[in-house]
Image (cartoon, grey):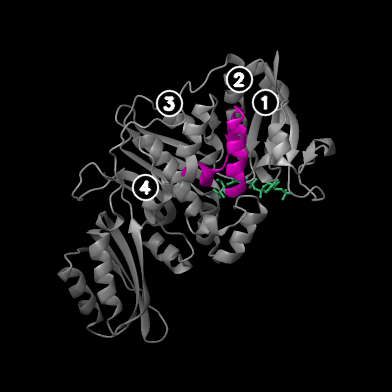
Amino acid sequence: MGKVNVAIIGGGTVGGGVYQALKKNGRLIASRLGISLSVRSVVVRDLQKTRNVKIAKKLLSTDWKSVVEDPKIHLVIELVGGVRTAKQIVKKALALGKPVVTANKALISEFGEELFALADENNTNLYYEASVAGGIPIIKVLREGLIGNRIPYIYGILNGTCNYILTRMKREGSEFGGVLEDAQRLGYAEAEPSLDVDGIDAMHKAGILGSLAHGFWIPPEQIHVEGIRGISPLDIQFSEQLGYTIKLLATIKPAKKTSDSCAIQISVCPTLVPNHHVLAGVQDVFNAIFIGGDIVGETLYYGRGAGQDATASAVVSDLADAALDLKHDTHNRIPPFVPHSEDGIVAPWEKTVAPFYLRLNVVDRPGTMSKITAILAESNIGISSIIQPEGHEGDMVPLILMVHDASIESMNHAVELIRKLKVVRGIPKVIRVENFED
Ligand code: NAP
Ligand code: HSE
């Protein structure tokens, strides 16, 4: 049996999980692969830190460069996070012709094209299964399982932390802040949790999925992103009354009604999902991705999207692929990313079209409603339903309108006019609705 010596650079939540998984199932993996995976080094920042996974002291180091350069190390796993040092680590290893496994979606989304090219130049491979959707093998699905399909749409709940927060806000009426602390304690959140709650983490993941599905590299700046900080318990409650659940949803689908009919829409934003749709029922830290293929039809993938063990499982699956590639001296059996539609484009966000939820805080007096509906009518935006709850205190009342398909451009314009009405106080809340009808 062959042996592959592995260095884990980063011994935190995921690195600790990979170390633990290899200890627990190393024999099983070896018997399945015919190769044993031997962890020779774990690199951390602080040798004195108390760790929830005990790592043998003799393996610990703080010097990633000498570990990566060590000729005894055959394979490098990058799990430090961030992009600066992570990029240096990955480039160094690839330049030495060593395969790299990473869970770093920010790195792949921002620099994937460059790093895949570097791997190719050095006749080695870069693996990134754990970068999207934690334990769900979604990269394999797109690269291998659905290789024979065009992918008309992908809808995904891609951030475990946000889904956990939104689930608890709905279930318990909890406030955002306290729930975020729980997500951090459970190891779901990024080291910098604003990456999660501001939608950046899901944006990186959506960019990776969109690039794989559509065959042109989609950089982060082309993806519309909004986080969940502005979602209030009131929005969750009214959405429920209307038959919807608010999810941080990644949407990758053809953009309708733009001048360029082959453009795609790619976004990550809070979205009202109908309660009867399977994605509305995805709770806690779970992720789910609903993918259409032109041959296979609808498919659904579900599992833990964050956390130590789920992510470790995905890293280990890449390790197995990498070990087999080393053993058989195979390179790019299925390339990590294949450009196949270099003229693909992303539609400008403001030209895309959707139905919307609009929550206003209005003065409760005759004529208020007609002023608002007049502005919507002038903007050619139709109303599908209205809620104005009874029993409010004072002279202000929430007013919730669901509107039919409108472009972001015309919706923004109408909302700006509504905001300026004397009968409207505060900032209107606008949330996209997805009815999965495309
Ligand atoms: P983490 O818990 O913060 O762990 C980071 C590890 O890297 C720590 O062990 C830290 O050392 C070490 N480190 C950081 N900078 C270093 C440096 N310059 N030199 C040496 N060691 C350094 O992060 P994580 O949650 O495991 O995430 C790691 C990666 O996996 C990120 O790219 C993240 O986006 C991705 N990911 C995470 C999850 C998840 O659920 N957590 C899921 C999927 C993907 P110390 O321990 O000494 O501080
Ligand atoms: N912080 C990320 C999340 C980790 O909550 O989904 C998994 O990529």
Task: Residue type at mark 2: give it.
Answer: Leu
Q: Nearer the viewer, residue 14 or 122?
A: 122
Residue annotated with mark 4: 251
- Residue receiving disc 2: 326
Q: Distance between the Cα atoms at labels 2 and 4?
A: 36 Å
Q: Are marks 2 and 1 in contact (CB under 8 Å)?
A: yes
51 on left or right of 29: right
Q: Pointer 3: what residue?
A: 145
Q: Residue at x 16, y 65 (%)?
A: 380
Q: Earlier in the sequence, mark 2 or mark 4?
A: 4
The local crowd at label 1, few if under 14, some if 14 to 19, many if 20 or more residues have their Cα within 10 Å, is many
Percent x, y of residue 347: 28, 50
Residue stretch in magenta: 84-109
Does residue 310 appear in the picture of this structure?
no
Residue kind at label 3, given as amino acid type: Gly
> In this figure, which residue is indicated by the disc labeled 1?
74
Q: Quadrant of residue 231?
A: bottom left
Give the secondary structure at mark 4: strand
N-term-proximal mark, 3 vs 2: 3
Mark positioned earlier in the residue sequence (3 or 1) = 1
